[in-house]
Image (cartoon, rainbow, N blue to C red):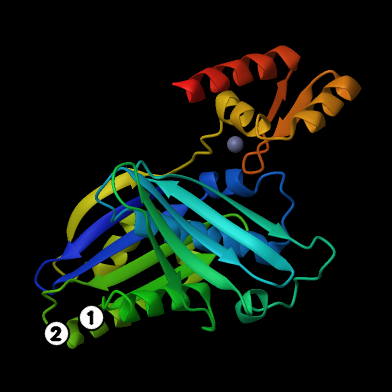
Amino acid sequence: MSDNIQRFIFDSFGIRGELVQLETSSQQMVLEHNYPPAIAELLQQVAAVTVLMTTTIKFEGKLSVQLQTPNELKMLVVQANHKLGYRGIARYDKGADYSQKSFQELTKGGRLSITIEPKKGKRYQGYVELGQKSFEACIENYFNQSEQLKTKIWLFNNEQKVTGLMLQALPDMLNQDSFDHLVFLANTLTTDECLNTESDVLLNRLFHQESVRDLMSHPVNFHCGCSRKKMLDSVALFPAEEIEEILQEKGRVPVKCEFCLNRFEFNAIDIKSHKAVAGNSTQH
Ligand SMILES: [Zn+2]
């Protein structure tokens, strides 16, 4: 399976679709985090849906899907940019047992949000109602209710990889029957074929009798976006006494990116010169 997304359209029906497959990138996302399987799988599912949604954004910027709960799974977030680079992380109670936990139990009382941050223009935030049996059902519900867009999503995954299919009615959809017909075809998909077949073969197998037009195929990557400069910016926000204490004890301030686990180290001169630059810039 290669990491990519395909967009396609059924012109005569007025229905569009997307198929995403993530393997290498999703393994990079969970690498060395030692997530319990239930959390790793949910993170992969959220990554697939985040990429599906990001593909339709028509501007430069970022889209994030974030879950916060009062339970053992405290927080889960996936962020993707318009170039289809994404990263994700989960924070959770490491002592809890997740083996028998359903999606509803993991997310009970939580809050699920979608945030779109264009490079230029206004930030948008929408809330997705929880309470459905699965993550994809919540997102379908969000599109159907809030966005008034008839949407169906299928997710197939294990700890290593995920395949996601989305069908969405365009404003000029011919009729409900054509949507139901495509849903009927997609309902025949099995986890085994979706995780072991390249997306173009899968689409051809599924819709070969329909008049479907390919719009684009785009690679998807794991992309953290952290840098020495950004890390130093965040270190500079620590209280001065705290930095001083760490420097005296260790001679440097070590920090780790919580997404990709890259390590950075800053000495007294790095921090001093950064503060001087920051100080200068605020005076102008
Ligand atoms: Zn990073």
Please provide percent x and percent y for residue 225. Answer: 51, 35
Please provide percent x and percent y for residue 191. Answer: 50, 69
Please provide percent x and percent y for residue 10. Answer: 16, 67
C-alpha gap between disc 1 and disc 2:
7 Å
Reply above or below: 212 against 14.
Answer: above
Residue under pointer 2: 175
Reply above or below: 247 against 185.
Answer: above
> What residue is shown at x 81% (from left), y 60% (from top)?
94
Please provide percent x and percent y for residue 125. Answer: 40, 62
> What residue is shown at x 62% (from left), y 75% (from top)?
107
Tag 1 near tag 2, CB within 8 Å: yes
Callout 1: few (<14), some (14-19), or many (20+) C-alpha neighbours within 10 Å? Answer: many
Amino acid identity at mark 1: Phe
Residue under pointer 1: 179
Reply above or below: 34 against 258.
Answer: below
- Say whether residue 99 is left or right of residue 199: right
The residue positioned farthest toward the bottom in the image shown: 177
- Assign the C terminus to one quadrant of the image: top left
> What residue is shown at x 41% (from left), y 54% (from top)?
51
- Say whether residue 123 is left or right of residue 15: right
Mark 2 Cβ inside 8 Å of ligand 1: no
* Residue 205 location, quadrant: bottom left
Mark 2: secondary structure? loop
